[in-house]
Image (cartoon, helix red, strand yellow):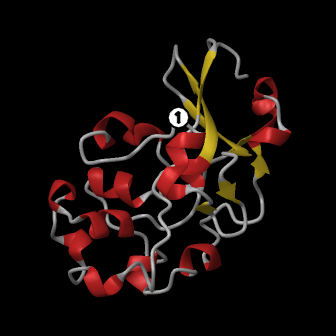
Amino acid sequence: MRSGAGDPRRLTAPFLLAQLKAPYGMSRLRPRFWETVPLKNMTSDEWEALCDGCGKCCLNKIEYEDTGEVEFTRVACRLLDGETCRCTQYPIRKQFVPDCVQLTPSTLPKIAYWMPRTCAYRLLHEGKPLPDWHPLVTGDPESVHTAGASVRGWTVPEFEVPEDEWDNYIIDETP
């Protein structure tokens, strides 16, 4: 734990890793919708397609209540497949992880601060563009992995690490 930090509140946030078909169901999406359609006006297919499949949102985080600082860990939700970076039980995930957050346009403003800095939902909420490697930009769902922007291959399942040891797995969440 960092010096001066208070007791951390542990956060788990596996969500929005839908099992989408083709390059993010592109046939059902308006062209470059993310550049013109406000988040609150997107269709459910468009909303789900914003997820780049990086898996970072499924990393357990530590939030220090006294500072509001959020640190990411390599410790992943037990439902995350560390190779595909997808939730293994996405449609029914809340049955297994009751505190899994369901991100919506109304919940986003409250939790954007602890979403990954490269998250499309956070970026668009902050008025920023999607990164060049985002699958919606490239048309390739593997581009997030090719760019090294995902957690593929380097997470540790939460059932292997006691919660009081998560501090040993803190990572630098790169921009």
- Left/right of residue 72 with respect to residue 118 in the rendered view: right
Quarter of the picture holding the N terminus: top right
* Tag 1 secondary structure: loop
Q: Image height check: is 22 above or below 170?
A: below
Q: Nearer the viewer, residue 65 or 172?
A: 65
Which residue is depicted at the point 55% across and 33% down? 70
Image point (58%, 39%), residue name? 97
Q: Position of residue 65 (x, y in %)?
A: 52, 17
The amino acid pointed to by label 1 is Pro
Where is 35 relative to 172, above or below? Answer: below
Question: Looking at the image, which residue is at 48% across and 68% down?
Answer: 52
Quarter of the figure with residue 45: bottom left
Q: Is residue 71 left or right of residue 27?
A: right
Q: How many marks?
A: 1
**Percent x, y for residue 32?**
25, 79
In which image quadrant can residue 113 be found?
A: top left
- Position of residue 41 relative to residue 69, above or below, is below
Residue 22 position by quadrant: bottom left
Per the image, the residue denoted by label 1 is 98
Q: Is residue 21 above or below residue 167?
A: below
Position of 41 with respect to 101 (left or right) is left
Q: Position of residue 170 (x, y in %)?
A: 73, 38
- Residue sitting at 32 percent across and 66 percent down? 129
As drawn, which residue projects farthest toward the right?
160
